[in-house]
Amino acid sequence: MFKKLLSLNTSQNQLNFASLVLRIIGGGFMLTHGLPKLQKVLAGDFKFGDPIGIGPEASLILTAAAEFGGALLLLFGLGTRLVSAPLMFTMIIAAFVAHGADPFGKKELALMYFGVYFALFLLGSGKFSLDAILSKDKSL
């Protein structure tokens, strides 16, 4: 057992499980940030920052789409690599623009999320995902 813990080898099953855990963490936890933004959009309350100069309305809608819609897709493993990109972008903007003047402790969460999304961008959704189910050979 100890030898296995020190091994440099990683099986495909371990990678698939790691991807599942990262998707649950990155997607599930981000929903708690995205849902309030989605509720603001649905209520017509567009008071929001404009960190990249596209207007507060567009900023809120795009952020809600990434943080709620993207997180939901990520949670189920649908388009994982594709939805990781807007989530990474959103977290970089949150860390370095929205919280640019704040101490590191305020940037830390966004950077942690960025790390999860970057890992998922590299790993993909794995076999425990809708991507894997939908990509099965339909001719069998």
Image: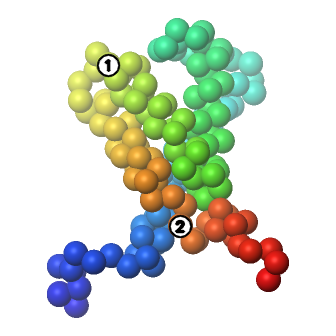
Q: Secondary structure at mark 2?
A: loop
Q: Is residue 76 visible?
A: no
- Amino acid type at image mark 1: Gly
Where, quadrant-wise, is the C terminus in this rendering?
A: bottom right
| Residue assigned mark 2 | 126
Residue 48 to residue 41: above or below: above
Residue 53 in the image, given as x and y percentages of width and height: 52, 9
- Could you tell whether 106 is left or right of 2 in the image? right
The structure residue drawn at horizontal position 36% and vertical position 46%, both measured from the top left corner, is 115
Q: Residue at x 31, y 31 (%)?
A: 107
Circles 1, 2 touching at the beta carbon (< 8 Å): no
The residue drawn where x is 41% and y is 20% is 98
Q: Which residue is farthest bottom?
A: 1
Question: Does residue 72 appear anywhere in the picture?
Answer: yes
How would you rate the neighbour count of disc 1 (Cα within 10 Å): few for under 14, some for 14-19, many for 20 or more? few
Gap between marks 1 and 2, in whole Å?
Answer: 34 Å
* Location of mark 1 (residue): 100
Which of the pair 20/119 is nearer the observer?
A: 119
Q: Residue 72, labelled with which disc?
A: none
- Residue located farthest toward the front when viewing the structure as drawn: 139
Residue 63 position, x and y percent, is 58, 28
Classify 108 as above or below 15: above
Figure check: 65 above or below 97? below
Q: Position of residue 6 (x, y in %)?
A: 17, 79
Three-letter amino acid code at the position of disc 2: Gly
Numbered disc 1: secondary structure: loop
116 relative to 108 in the view: left or right: right
According to the image, what is the colour scheme of the structure? rainbow
Q: Quarter-wise, where is residue 136 in the image?
A: bottom right
Question: Between residues 127 and 69, which one lies in front from this camera angle?
Answer: 127
